[in-house]
Each structure stands twice: as structure tokens, then as C-alpha cells.
Amino acid sequence: MSIGYLSAQVDLTYQKPPGDILDLVDVPLPPSVSIDSKAENMVLLYRNQFKTIAELSETELRLAGLRINPVTNIGSRTRYYNKVALQSVGQKKSKKIKGLPEEYRVSNIDWSPDESKVAFTNTTEKGAELWVVDIASASAKKITEDNLNANMGRPYVWMPDGSGFLVKVLPQDRQALIDKSVAIPSGPRISVNEAGVKAQNRTYQDLLQDKADEANFEQLARCQLVMFDLEGESSPWKAAGMYRSMRFSPDGEYLMLSTIKRPFSYLVPYYRFPTLTEVYDKQGNLVKEILNQPLIEELPQGFGAVATGKRSIGWRADAPATLYWTEALDGGDPNAEADYRDEVLLWAAPFDQNPESIIKLHNRYSGISWGNEAVAIAYDSWFKDRNTKSYLFDPSTPGKNVHIIEDRNSQDRYSDPGSFVTEKNTYGRNVLTLEKDQLFLIGQGYSADGRQPFLDAFDLDTRETERLYQAQNKDNFERISELLDAKAGVLLTRIESPTDYPNYYIRNIKKRIAPQPITFFENPYQALEEVHKEVITYKRDDGLELSGTLYLPEGYDQKKKEKMPMIMWAYPREYKDRASASQVTASSNTFTAPYYGSPVYWVTRGYVVLDGASFPIIGEGEEEPNDSFRKQLVANAKAAIDAVDDMGYIDRDRVAVGGHSYGAFMTANLLSHSNLFAAGIARSGAYNRTLTPFGFQREERSYWDAPEIYYKMSPFMHADKMKTPLLLVHGEADNNSGTYPLQSERYFNALKGLGAPVRLVMLPKESHGYTAKESVLHLLWEQDQWLEKHVKNKKAATPRP
């Protein structure tokens, strides 16, 4: 079927792409793997690649940033596993789990504290139920009925001693939901700001809209808390409430419980609603109110803006029952001058003493890794200058013995020292791995010479690092997953190549022996085995180094150099310095695994593919990256086409560009402001930035701060310049901030009204990413038809000026 420029809707059922693509899409995948911390047992998790459109068509309510199936009381977009198996490390065959139902839908998987069991929820037609699997006997047992409330995430937590669970169950007094399709309104919907308070929020989706939504959200959020032992015996723990989170102290003596309160908001999602955080003892008695957070609708402007008061509250992992949190020292305003932005405080149970400040941070708090009573690592970051710091400090001497051990540009991947390794302590919590006054770091190993992951030892006395192991990655690609035994030098690694599916290995870095495989998954994409893959580097006109991953069709003669059509896929990223923007992070040795949105499929259709082409947008010093967005965008695209054209592989008059989300925004801009492309594909994008007036992507300025930037960057404002064929695709149920389906619909209407060659495909039920098999296959068919007509078989173009 050919595609024409139609002036009306097309009556078309779901289509399938050509066989070359279909054979790669519709393949059973090897399982996901969850390995215990000692690398003794593995849980193998199988699932279908896609949902069905029937699944996406199940009842769904979109409330306060959540998408809920009100029948099953679990997230309506949950991806389920449909098969679970066990396998002992060192064995090639998996073990079937006894006691499971014939058909099941598994999610919310969690190991027990001692890793002897695994719990998960199974969703039936009526609701979610809790199951537990005993690893030793490979047997499963149902703990609860299908009456769990999983509408705000995992509906259970393990008791710290592994003896049972605290579970969210549906309340017995739950009221019927309001059917808004038949409900008669009792009055208009009114929002006010009579006090003139600034409330500059991003364009959130799925927000509450009226009193009916408020009532439905409250009913769907309410649950009772019930204790269950491993035999399924239960005892009530707390009456119904809108419980958002529940977290036991490491010693199991206390529970921190967060409860959502009214008033709700029509401007922000549920996690900014009023929330009461309290600590109870394990019998359910109130011990202390920790935080009574009001509704957060107003924040200062900027990415570093935070609410005042306690935030990021958690249990210290290396102590029996001590809370920690951070508070802003600058009023939460990133525009205020301050030597220190945040401080971290401790408060030990039973909370009869005053909280204690233990460290002040120059930037905004971003986490803590606890070690022991004398060792911890704190992290901070600051958006404006992309700075990040790490602090080695002694929690027992507040404000003293603080050492900044990392102070760098967060976008500088080459200087990244890696992440500190953790292990489970006696409480079953992750703490820093400490061996002979050394901590350990696993890094990704980005460098100008290629990506070579590493393991370093960090000396606590000298604060110097020593390289213990680094992957060579000459013919394959090895990444370090875990340090299993610091003393013995045993690593869990994952090894792959362009044609070898990733598998896990045990490597002993102190013994010169080959790594021992513990999984044996085969390549499901054998049709791509003979495809040529390499990371290429090239320069922009201003000398900036760029890169991308180039794919050539099977059998392509690199000496003969036949001129082929090309697809370039990219996503713009903002930087504050040229050095970081030019770094290479891709590897030629990683496994080639196409996903639903990948352009790699078309290498089987006779196209050269340049995937992940560098599209840096740089603004150094006082200049913001978006001040020269369009100019840099076109320069990036020209450099990529020039590079592959200079290699002799492509017909530069037959090049397509595509992208998803911000990549779609990039695509529309490139087609509007250059003549480099024969066609474009833009999926789930935003094209009119005045509809996202309080910032977008990494742009902090509002429309009223920089109206010319919003105008220049909006393809909608320049629709009259568009002459290149553009395929627009959007999910009708997009939930991403800013990328309303309306963005594509209005942009299409503008282009159509101005006579541009354009096609709009709205995918029913789909969100920002597409999950139904029918949708994905049709998407690939649409893209293939578009490329065949407007790129591969493009009519001779008029000479370029």
C-alpha cells in the first residue's frame, strides 16, 4: 500500500511491517535475571516483549499523576512477567517452581532480607495477591487474597527478620467510584490565586480535574495495613488511610509511615499533596510525628528549587533505628547566594533528643552511602554549573573530618570515578563494602580510548585510589555488575559482543583463569549477526568532536562503496562545556539489540543507519545552551551527514532523520531550518513551547524570561518553512510532561493548512512510550512505508543551492 498526501482521515486497521523487520521484532527474548548478593541463586523472569491492545484497553483512571486499573487496583501500565524460574549458579538448567497457578502475571518482586525467599504480586482478573517462593525447595505459596492495594507502587514490605509482611489491603468500607461519564455536575470547576502567589509548575499530565476526581483518588488511595506471616495468617495493624509509603527501621522495632492528606491540588501530582510522616513502634503505637508537609504548589524558579523543611527522609542503613534527612539552608531558592545549600541531620529513636546536624553541603543534596559509625559518603549536585561533589565524612563527629573526595563536572564522563560498592549488613541493608580500611568503586571507564569498566580500591587514610581490575574490551564488551567478595577478588560481570547476547560470569581477578559463565542465553537476533557496526568520530564545523554508531547492511562492500540511503536517529543534550560535549560514550563491541523504537531494523532493508548521533547543544559561561539551539542543531546534523558521505557510503540526497520526544522536537526543527534531509520521523514530541511556558527539557527560563527563545525553538511558529515530508506519531494517552497529544495534532493542522507534506498517526491507548504489540508493529509499518516512499525511492531532487 502506498501512502499519499491525504486530505481526510485514512480508514486503516493495524498493519505489520515487512518480514525482514517482523522477524526481528516478534522474537522470544531470554529472561531478565535477578541474582542474590552472594551469587548463589538466580531468579529468571520471562515476559512477552509487548502488551496487547486489549490489555491497554482495560479500564483505566488517570488521577493525580497515577494511572490505575480500578478493577485490579494496580498500575494500569504495569509490565508483567508471565513465567518465573529458579536456577542455581553453576547449573545450566533452571528449576520449575512448584505451586504456582497455570497462568500468572508477576510484578513487585523483592528478595527477603536473608535472600532465602522471593516475594511478588500476582495480578488476577479481580486484583493483586501476594505470593512467596522458597528458594531451597523451589516452591511457591499464596499469602493473601487478590485484595491488595498496589495503586501507589509495591503494596507490601518484608518484616526485617523475614518472618512475614506488612501489606496494604483494600479497606472494608471502600465506597463505589463515581462514573464521570454519567455523573451530573453539581457546579463549575474553579481554581483561584487571589493571594497572587507564584506557582510556576511544569505542565504535568493526569492531574485531578474536579470533585469527582478527588473522591475517586481518595477511594483508590485508601488501604488498611495488615500483618501477614509466611503461613498467610493475618492480624490488623492500622485502620484505613491514604498510605503512601511504609519503611521499617533496620532493627525492625519501628515503622515510618507516610500518609496523604487533604486538600488535594489540580496543579501538581499526588507526591506534592500534604503528607504526614510518622514513626510507629512495631505494635502500631504512635511514637513521633516527623513531618507534617503542607501542599507544595509553589516553589522558587529553577531546577535546584526545593521545598523548605525536611525532605528525603530515610532510615540510616548502618544503625538500628536512626532517621536522617536533609534541609535547605538557602530557603530552597537556587537563585539565593549561599556557601552551603543543604545540611543533613540525624535523629535516633526514640526521638527524645534534638536532631543533630552532621554535614553541610555546598550543592543540593543527592544522596548518602552509609558505611559504619565512622564512615559515610555524601553526594551533592548543582544544575547551573553541572558541578557534583562527594564527601567522605565521619557521622560520629558532626561537622568535623569532612573531606571532599570528588569535585567535578557531572557531565564529564571521562573523569567519573565510579560508584562506591555496597554489600548487605546484618540488618539486610546495603552499606559500603569495607575491607582493610579500603572502600571500592566500580566505574564505567569512559575514555577517549574506548569504554573499559574498572574496579578501584579507595584508601580511607590517603584518599587515593588503586586500579584493581580494568576490562580490556578489545573483541567483546565486559561490564562489572557487582563485587561479590572483596577479600578474594571475586566479581560478577556481564560479557557481550555485537553478536553474542549478554551473559553473566564470575571472574576472580586474583587468579589468572577465564571467567566462568553462569548464564547461557543465546542470540535471538541472528539476522543481524553479519551487520557491520562501528563507532565513528567526526568534527563539527567549529571543531567540536562528535560521534555516532554506524551500521552497514549485511554484505555491504566497503571498498565498492555503493551509495545507500541513510537514517539518522538522535536526541539533543545540553552541555555547559565543549570538552564534556565531545566525549564518546558508545562502544562498537556492545550487543546489537533493537527495541521497538530503534532505527537499526532498517539496516535489513538496505539502509545505512547512524544511531545515537551526537547532538550537543552547548552554552558556556553566561550563555545558555538554547541561546543558539537552531544553529547548533543544524551544525550537528551537517557534520554527521558529511562524515558518512566522506566515507563514501551514502547518497546524501536520500537521508532521513528521526527521533522520539525531544528527538522529535529536534527533527521538526531540522526539517524547518535546513535542507539536509529527504524526510523525517517525529514521535511523541512537543512543537509549540508556549504550551510549556515554565520551562522544558533543561531550559530553566520561563516564556516571559526569554520569549524569543521559546519562539525561535518552536517548530510550530515556523510551520510555513516546512517543505520536507514529515511523519508525526503520537500516543493518544501520552502522560509525559509537556508532550500532550495536542502538540502533534495542532502541529499537523498547521502544516496541513500551509500545504506541507505530512502524515499524523495517533496510536490509541498508547502513552509516551508504546507497549501494545499491535501499535508497535503498525508503527514500524508506518515508518517503513514513509522511508520507502520519501527516502529510498525518492524522486530526483532539484539541485541544491
Image: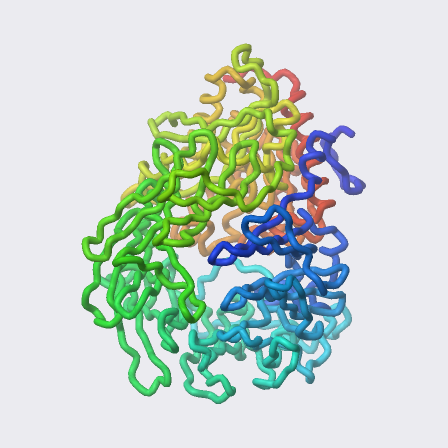
- Scheme by which the image is coloured: rainbow
In this view, the residue in front, 472 or 717, is: 472
Q: Nearer the viewer, residue 98 or 237?
A: 98
User: Which residue is at a point 38% across and 27% down the rendered structure image?
Assistant: 540
Question: Is 27 rendered above or below residue 270?
Answer: above
Residue 10 vs 230, above or below: the answer is: above
Q: Residue at 45% of width from left, 34% of height from top?
A: 587
Q: Is residue 465 visible?
A: yes
**Residue 578 falls left or right of residue 229:** left
The image quarter containing residue 309 is bottom left
- Residue 391 x, y percent position in the rendering: 26, 59
Q: Judge left or right: residue 110 versus residue 288.
A: right
Quadrant in the picture for the N terminus: top right
Query: How many discs mark residues in the rendered view?
Result: 0
Quadrant housing residue 608: top right
Left or right of residue 182, residue 576 in this image: left
Position above or below: 229 against 437: below
Asked if one can make out residue 188 in the rendered structure from this viewpoint, the answer is: no
Residue 400 screen position, x and y as percent: 19, 67
| Residue shown at 59% from the left, 29% from the top | 723
Q: Position of residue 288 (x, y in %)?
A: 41, 85
Residue farthest to the top, as pictured: 560
Q: Is residue 440 above or below residue 155?
A: above
Residue 485 falls left or right of residue 375 = right
Q: Who is closer to the viewer here, 624 or 261?
A: 261
The quarter of the displayed image where residue 656 is located = top right
At 62% from the left edge and 69% from the top edge, which residue is drawn? Answer: 150
Residue 28 % position (x, y): 69, 43
